[in-house]
Amino acid sequence: MMHIAFCTDTNYIIPTGVAMISVCENNKEEIITFHLVITDEATDNIDIKEKVKPLLDIAAKYSKMANVYRMPESRISEFVCNGEVHVSTTAFSRIFLPEILDSSIKKVLYLDCDLVCDGSLSDLWNITLPEDCPIGAIVDSNYASPRMHQIAEIPSTAKYINSGVLLMNLDCWRNNNYIDLSVNVALDKRFPMLDQDLLNHLFYENILYLPIKYNMQIVTLLDGIDNCHIDMAYYEEIKDACINPIIIHYQSANKPWKLEKCPYKEKWQKYYELSIWKESPFSEVTTRFDRSYIYEEIESSYWSDPTLFKTEAYSYMRFFKAATKLKNKKIIVKLVSFLLDSFSSIIELIYAIKTNK
């Protein structure tokens, strides 16, 4: 029995469905149970049941099983102080899988919703995690970046991982109380890359590194393999993964339903056209901007050293959210200038946001 988990909300049903179809199409002989964790906090159960029905129908069509869960209210409340959300519960929902899933389930393959599977997952699922190893993961496309290491507070010799594909040792999490530890550290550190920085920070010494073909991140192709922070030890493996990826991960803002030209767009579109949404325009795939790149707060310890973000493209959505919340035209104008000038005015923008000028 293969256990695969997606953590999503009702605004992201279509990408989740496309991901499920891609898994099913390439693993027709596998016995699979999908675990769908719905993270909407203010939607009633009847509304959620109606909206996730297409996902249940996908599982049934391929003779797979599917279970739907809600994020525990007790856990959501831990991220709320005086009525304000301090950390995105959606982004961190995967760390609660050891608690949400039945104790009889010892291992789960967690997948982000903005990906497709284009091959068999059997070999990946059959990898044995050591008893004391909490996760198996794939290195990030910029895993050797000194800046990523500094932000996650890990040694420069560590390999920074991407959290979009995780093989999770659930018993290891349960036995070591890693959920409570994760919540406490998340609230304390306020990492900009949320759960990804958190997992690197907590487990960099005890991660089982998985083949890159199981999380081929398209940023590698958009930025160019020679421009990513990688070392020669992974160069050939990354090139091979580009040619024969098993899981294609459309991370960052580079979604195939948003960009006219996107690496492996035809792969995503192939599975999209097998769905009930195939007649819908791409503009309706998600009903709001991808939550992965919207952060709940702009205030964190990292503002004390804004040079950390001077050239980091992944940071711009923090400023977008801040600008729209503040409804300050001067800041929004600065944001547009910032984007058009390839992030050259980031220091000025940070100052404007902090001072609300």
Image (tube, grey):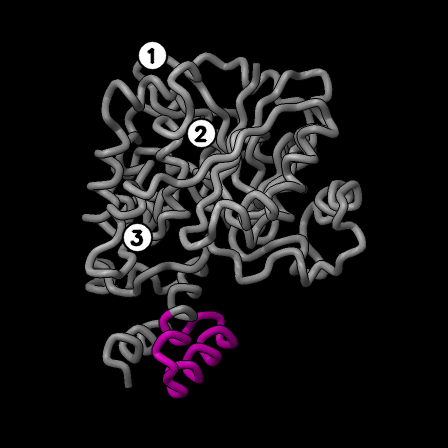
- Residue 184, image quadrant: top left
Taking the image as shown, residue 113 lies to the left or right of residue 63, namely left
- How far apart, in angstroms, are the residues tagged by discs 1 and 2? 16 Å
Q: Number of labelled discs? A: 3
Q: Secondary structure at mark 2?
A: strand
- How far apart, in angstroms, are the residues tagged by discs 3 and 1? 30 Å
Q: Are marks 1 and 2 in contact (CB under 8 Å)?
A: no
Q: Is label 1 or label 2 in front?
A: 1
Disc 1 marks a residue whose amino acid type is Glu
Label placed on residue 289: none
Q: In the picture, which quadrant includes the C terminus?
A: bottom left
Q: Are marks 2 and 3 in contact (CB under 8 Å)?
A: no
Per the image, the residue denoted by label 1 is 131
Per the image, the residue denoted by label 3 is 87
Disc 3 marks a residue whose amino acid type is Val
Seen in the picture, residue 278 relative to 300 is either above or below; the reply is above
Taking the image as shown, residue 185 lies to the left or right of residue 224, namely left
Disc 2 marks a residue whose amino acid type is Ala
Label placed on residue 137: 2
Mark 3 surroundings: few (<14), some (14-19) or many (≥20) residues within 10 A: many
Q: Secondary structure at mark 3?
A: loop
Q: Is label 2 or label 3 in front?
A: 3
Q: Secondary structure at mark 1?
A: loop
Q: In the picture, which quadrant includes the N terminus?
A: top right
Seen in the picture, residue 213 relative to 50 is either above or below; the reply is above
Q: Could you tell which of marks 1 and 2 lies nearer the N-terminus? A: 1
Q: Position of residue 217 (x, y in %)?
A: 56, 42
Q: Is label 3 or label 1 in front?
A: 3
- Magenta region, residue range: 322-344
Between 199 and 42, the one lying in front of the other is 42
